[in-house]
Amino acid sequence: MNRETMNTTQTAEPAGAQKGMSDLFEHALRDMYYAEKKIYRTLPRMIRAAGDATLKRALTDHRDETMEHVETLETIFGQIGKKPKAVKCDAIDGILEEGDGLLEDFGGTEVADAAIIFSCQAVEHYEITRYGSMRVFALALGLPEAAGLIDGVLAQEKAADDLLSQVSESQMKMAA
Ligand code: FE
Ligand code: ZN
Ligand code: FE
């Protein structure tokens, strides 16, 4: 895809036309719509398996935020005049599958919390990369409101990641 096609897709495109930035942005929205919903359904398993009270609380709070993220994505779909639609995202499926495997291997052990943090931080970092890109795409597409909403979600993902780092560090200190 060259620069020219990226800039001309906003206008009427013939069937089979090359896809452009708005298509990529819509794909990203659908990806994250799928991802956030799946994260929401996966978090209870992590919360149940967590031993540390602060970790349980952090994950529980972030699950509520995750529902807000789903709703924010629905708002952005509306802003671009599209119906909310999910598309299977292999990337998040892989990360969450690995997380379930880690729970099987390490759940109930003395490193269960560390294993939960290990997989949840992978999820947060995944979300951070995607929302970081999407924020820039939204600005490029002249969608400052969408960019602002994405920025808000991004801040919550970063805060969740930071909190997991803090819990991890305090646990490691206790173990040392
Ligand atoms: Fe999220
Ligand atoms: Zn994708
Ligand atoms: Fe998150």
Image: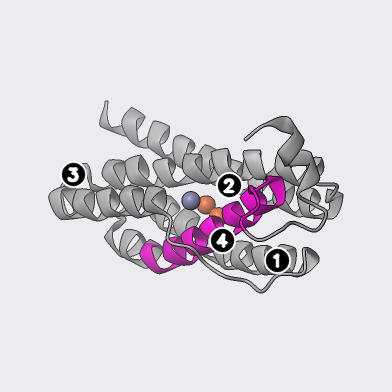
Mark 2 vs mark 3, CA separation in Å: 27 Å
Q: How far from the left and from the top, in percent, is residue 130?
A: 57, 43
Residue 96 horizontal side relative to residue 123, left or right: left
Assign a secondary structure to mark 1. Answer: helix
Q: What residue did someone put label 2 on?
A: 157
Q: How far from the left and from the top, in percent, is residue 162?
A: 54, 38
Q: Compare marks 2 and 4 and give the one earlier in the sequence.
A: 4
Identified by mark 1, the residue type is Phe
Q: Which residues are magenta?
A: 16-42
Assign a secondary structure to mark 3. Answer: loop
Residue 157 horizontal side relative to residue 155, left or right: left
Q: Compare marks 4 and 3 and give the one earlier in the sequence.
A: 4
Q: What residue did someone put label 4 on?
A: 30
Identified by mark 4, the residue type is Arg
Identified by mark 3, the residue type is Glu
Q: Nearer the viewer, residue 10 or 155?
A: 10
Q: Nearer the viewer, residue 1 or 118?
A: 1
* Mark toward the viewer: 2 or 4: 4
Q: What residue did someone put label 3 on?
A: 110
Say whether residue 34 is magenta: yes
